[in-house]
Amino acid sequence: MGDKPKLILASSSPRRRDLLARIGIIPYRTASPDIDETPRKGELPRVYALRMAEEKAAAVMREDGEIVIAGDTTVAVGRRILPQAATEDLQRGFLKLLSGRRHHVLSAVCVIDAAGHSRSRMSDSVVKFKPLGEAEIEAYIASGEGLGKAGGYAIQGRAEALVSWMSGSHSGVIGLPLYETRALLRAAGYPVG
């Protein structure tokens, strides 16, 4: 039947690599896609997340027979996209905005199979933070955990204790929805248990 195809992870995120390992997948290699992640004027969060995953997958060099997987996780409050918190001030603003309210975490996955065909899926999770006091926000910022993360938090760490309710894919909120990922990889001919 031939060798298992080589899987390329189009991400520099250690979280995505760890999540793939949970379903027994170790990528052959990883590559950081170099794309412009600026949302387009008026672009809705769902459209943006799918576009990002697809552009990341397409931006990575793929040799014949290789499969590429890419993901994008977008935090959205209504129609507003919360980017990665590049500074503590941005993170503080995001946490104040998310305090006591629900928001969506859209986690898109794109797989380009060995023949070059692209397939994408989306996970839409709803997360609600407890009302956050100023001291809680400052303590979380001081932990350094949410800096550089979409929406300014990482659910797989301390922020999980701030979440009062969640519906959807926990792995999707971390960065790669495993149910959708497994389905896409199987459809692309990549053996997944």
Image: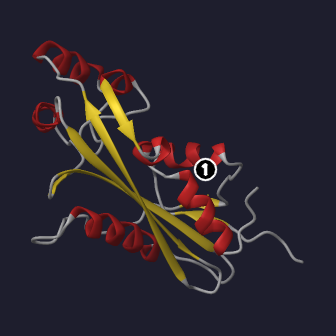
The answer to whether residue 36 is above or below residue 154 is below
Instruction: Return the x and y of residue 85 as percentages of the image width and height.
Output: 21, 42
Instruction: Return the x and y of residue 32 as percentages of the image width and height.
Output: 44, 60
Asked which secondary structure carries label 1, the reply is: helix
The answer to whether residue 79 is above or below residue 167 is below
Amino acid type, label 1: Leu
What residue do we see at 12% from left, 38% from top?
90
Position of 51 with respect to 138 (left or right) is right
What residue do we see at 43% from left, 42% from top?
174
Q: Quadrant of the C terminus?
A: bottom right
Extreme residue in the top direction: 135
Position of 97 with respect to 67 (left or right) is left
Instruction: Return the x and y of residue 4 as percentages of the image width and height.
Output: 79, 69
**Residue in front for this viewpoint, 185 or 9:** 185
| Colour setup of the view | secondary structure
The answer to whether residue 62 is above or below residue 97 is below
What residue do we see at 15% from left, 38% from top?
94
**Residue in front for this viewpoint, 181 or 58:** 181
Position of 17 with respect to 12 (left or right) is right
Using the rendered view, name the quadrant where residue 167 is placed: top left
Q: Please give the residue where the numbered disc 1 appears in the rendered image.
A: 20
Instruction: Return the x and y of residue 134 as percentages of the image width and height.
Output: 11, 17
What residue do we see at 51% from left, 80% from top?
118
